Amino acid sequence: MRFPTPDLQQRLLGNGGRVPSGLFRPNYYRQKRRGGIGGPSSLAAAAASDPVLQMQLEALRAMLRDLTNINVRQPSHMAPPFRATQFLFQTYLQATNVEPVAIPINGNVAVPVGTNAVIYWIDYSIGAAFNTTLTVPGWGETGAGQLPVTLYKNSQAIPGLSSLLPRYTMGVQLTSGADFLVQQRGPAAVPLIPITLQQGDALSFTNNVGGTGEAYLQIAGYTYPIEVDGDGIRGTLADRG
């Protein structure tokens, strides 16, 4: 069996074979050949005649050999960077709002200048015994109308959130027998793709609460300082975090 380096068998057996510094080991067999398999590379040839390039090449080689890990992070629109500031909007809906209602971002009507924002959580629910019936008419049950919430970004409905229906857990107190014997539970909150907002963007919502009962809306996200002002993933990935 041919090993890539003479001491590999000793190192595998734990007998203290020689281990050179750095992450990458030199190719033993290539060192036996003059200039490598294909002869000196064009970069090495150019570096031989240019002292500055030779120094840069040696510095790059030393960095790569000793670099055992690269500190990576998710883009800022996927995970909150260290400098992010949480914001939370919570409201109790008692009536229908036909005109858009502003959603403040930490007290600001729009995303502050010099920052980006991300929405990562939206929860819309209705409470127990809505309309004092044994069924919840939030999705059109028993022939009743639906109770949607629509979210807007800069007065434009956000795709997928233009008619968000509520989730619910309901128990009905009976006049006899065990309390909350009749119960219903609606669908859970839907998974949400993070919604990115740039400086100056504004959020708002409309809702239809057609009846008496309790309805709740929660929106959570975060803001963070802009590191690179660019659209797409390049801008959020370049942020230092």
Image (cartoon, helix red, strand yellow):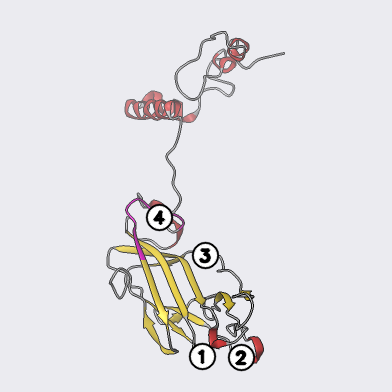
Is 28 within the magenta? no
Q: Residues within 10 Å of mark 4 (few under 14, many from 20)?
A: many
Which of these two is toward me, 187 or 117? 187
Mark on residue 144? Answer: 2
Residue 216 position in % (x across, y down): 45, 77
Q: Residue at x 40, y 23 (%)?
A: 48
Q: Amino acid at mark 3?
A: Ile
Do residues under tags 2 and 3 come within 8 Å of each other at their CB atoms?
no
Task: Describe the element under mark 2 as helix, strand or loop.
Answer: loop
User: Residue 4 appears in which quarter of the rendering?
Assistant: top right
**Earlier along the polypeptide chain: callout 4 or callout 1?**
4
- x and y percent of residue 77 in the render? 44, 59
Residue type at tag 1: Gly
Name the residue carrying label 3: 193
Q: Secondary structure at mark 4?
A: loop
**Residue at label 1?**
210
Q: Earlier in the sequence, mark 2 or mark 3?
A: 2
- Can you tell which mark lies on residue 80? 4
Compared with residue 41, is residue 128 higher up or lower down, i.e. above or below? Answer: below
The circle on residue 136 is none
Residue lying at 36% horizontally and 76% vertically, measured from the top left: 103
- Furthest toward the front, the residue is 176
Task: Please indicate whether residue 35 sits to the left or right of residue 225 in the image.
Answer: right
